[in-house]
Amino acid sequence: MKRRDFSKTMLLLGLGAKSTFARQSIPSAVESPESYEEPAKRLPVRHFDVVVAGGGTAGLFAAIAAGRQGAKTMLIESKGYCGGIAVEGGTAIHSFYNLYTAFEGCKKIKAVQGIPAEFMDKLTEMGGCTGYPEMETARDYDAVCTAIDTELYKLLAFRMLEQAGVFVAVNTLLAGAIVNDSRIRGVITESRSGREAIMANSFVDCTGYGDLCAHAGAGFNVPNDYDSCNSFGLANASIDDYYEFLKSHNAIGQMCRGPRSGEENKFVRMGAEQLDIPALQAEAHKIGMSMITTTVHDNYLMYIKCNYKIPGSVLNRDDVAKAEIEIRNRIARAAELLREYVPGFEKAFIARTSPSLCIRRGRQIICDYDITHEDVIDGRHFDDDTVVYGFHDWAPRYQIKDGGTYGIPYRALCVKSVENLYAAGMMITSDHRAHMSTRNTVSCMGQGQATGTAAALCAQKHCGSRELKFADLKKELLKSKVYFAS
């Protein structure tokens, strides 16, 4: 074909494509100064057994569990990686063990095992986790310190998802749900590839915000009962120097030694009690800066946190936008304070931040059972336990009785009024005191494995979440080495 003819042909093809696109994307629609009625659009469809919405702390393990169960599984995640608060917070992972250090003669129990523990073992082998070294101080708060490398965590997450055969759709937004007769038939996603309809048998909401539940018409509350935060990593800053600084002011609080940069018995967690530096204390309080840090590397603090109570709601775009700006100003000030006051930190700089603020609770989803404060601190277990847990973030104020554990029942994960939807992670539990336990990272991981396994079984058995026999679920969880209290 001659060059002139080729160019003419391509021009005609281009005009045709443009014309077709215009006819499809701008049909007639109802419009007014206050609103615009979006026209209907035919979407391409994909089919799966299980859809997990959110690849965060719970969603990662839900997707791995469903994939290993043999279910054709899709994981939908809005960011370009998985891990959620576990990697965005960057703090110690609380907690695989019961609080055995706070009670004389208390039995040491690795309460959360299964896939989450397997993940941490692999991460430790990669040099990205401290494992479970015992706390030297603050032993009435947590028994162990499991610190992580956030970037290696993200890498391992992708590797294990791939090994489980999960279809991972990162950089993909959950935009809606297709619901019929109290069952979700599918979800709508939005990405640079366009809008798609994803049809499946079973669904798990691990979005943190309860987005899928809300799209599906489930009941929820918005308590707005927590500060939000962003955490950052500080380079050119040694935790050993931080220890010497706190020691010189008789202010050492939380402290733990473990493996760091390939060497054993190194500081991996360090926190301050009351400092005798009023100006620093006042400024830190003003910006919500925590004086606790965690690391797995020399000359780098993985985790320094600044809290901020959003005036408004974490579900309001404009409120959150203002908060993002405020928190980043607080982070910058925190780094300045540490450079100014801590000897050896003079050349420290911010090397990591979370891509967006971290919440502790968005929507509280109404499930078939609501875990109470008494369930937690009295160490209650249920006939349908799916997760056993033993950490409380308000310890020592609230501790689980005798250093024991409590159970998260299956029905606490079943979303009320929807037949094939589970909620896992920070969305369950209305009681703030109970939620200060159930929302923590390792609890969310265990909930993820339970819901992913259940969703896969429902898909394979062609049944709803309430029709699934708990004995069948427990059998599969036991196969996956999940721990159940005797």
Image (spheres, rainbow, N blue to C red):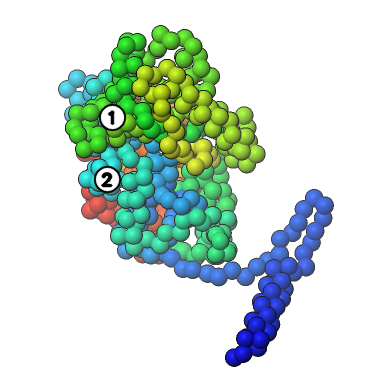
- Percent x, y for residue 358? 49, 37
Q: Residue at x 42, y 53 (%)?
A: 466
The one of 206 and 308 positioned closer to us in this rendering:
308
Q: Type of residue at label 2?
A: Leu
**Res 448 label:** none
- Percent x, y for residue 68? 30, 59
Q: Residue at x 33, y 36 (%)?
A: 93
The one of 286 and 222 positioned closer to us in this rendering:
286
The one of 5 and 91 positioned closer to us in this rendering:
5
Residue lying at the far front in this picture: please name it.
Answer: 3
Q: Type of residue at label 1?
A: Val
**Res 268 label:** 1
Quadrant of the image for the C terminus?
Answer: top left
147 w.r.t. 70: above or below: above
Contact, CB < 8 Å: mark 1 with mark 2? no
The residue carrying mark 2 is 123
Left or right, 387 with respect to 75, comes to: left
Residue lying at the far bottom in this picture: please name it.
Answer: 1
Q: Residue at x 71, y 71 (%)?
A: 22
Q: Earlier in the sequence, mark 1 or mark 2?
A: 2
